[in-house]
Image (cartoon, grey):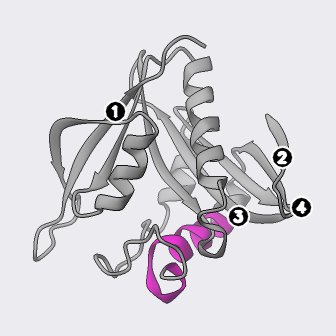
Amino acid sequence: MLKRVQHDENGLVNEITITTAPADAPALKALLEAAYRGDSARQGWNHEADILDDERIAPGELEAMLADPAVTILTARDGERLIGCVAVTRKDASLAYLGMLCVLPTLQSSGLGRKLLDAAEDLARTEGMAAMEMTVIDSRDSLIAWYERRGYLRTGETRPFPVPRDPPVTFVVLEKPLGPA
């Protein structure tokens, strides 16, 4: 298990760890739902609450991810409390997919999301990945801009949202070359 302990300027302990324990699934689901959906998500800047109202992650999906050897979930904790996460999925020999990056809404804009993103990129680079790819809902301009400031570029590719919506929701694909480890 990788463990990196960092203290922020407010004294919060931000441990970034790699977790593969199925027991983490309920806490991860609660964090994802709080960060992306409903009124709690509106406390932060990075939410989909005004676009989507269903569950962020389907029942059983986290457990499947935790059991998949191609997926690594990094978590950030303040002591025992889960405060952030990100998933890295090895797509092929040179491409990783970044997903589920989220931070507890009350801690967004604290720099923790950037730390999680850096840790995810470091992990992918260490595993020999040449690039990191992600998808973002195309109407989330501020989030796309945040990733672009961190070196991600629009590929020109779009992908449909996995569940039909009215009006339709589309993803843009972003990618970042990772360089050597």
In the rendered structure, which amino acid carries the disc numbered 1? Glu
Residue 112, image quadrant: bottom right
| Residue closer to the observer: 131 or 30 | 131
Residue at x 52% of width, y 48% of height: 65
In the rendered structure, which amino acid carries the disc numbered 3? Ile
**Residue 126 image offset from top left, x and y in percent:** 62, 18
Is 115 in the magenta? no
Lateral position of residue 130 relative to residue 16, left or right: left
Residue named by callout 2: 6
Pointers 3 and 1 in contact (CB under 8 A)? no
Q: Secondary structure at mark 4?
A: loop
The residues bearing labels 2 and 4 have C-alpha atoms spaced at a distance of 9 Å
The residues bearing labels 4 and 1 have C-alpha atoms spaced at a distance of 34 Å
Q: Secondary structure at mark 2?
A: strand
Q: Secondary structure at mark 1?
A: strand
Residue named by callout 4: 11
In the rendered structure, which amino acid carries the disc numbered 4? Gly
Pointers 2 and 4 in contact (CB under 8 A)? no
Residue named by callout 1: 175
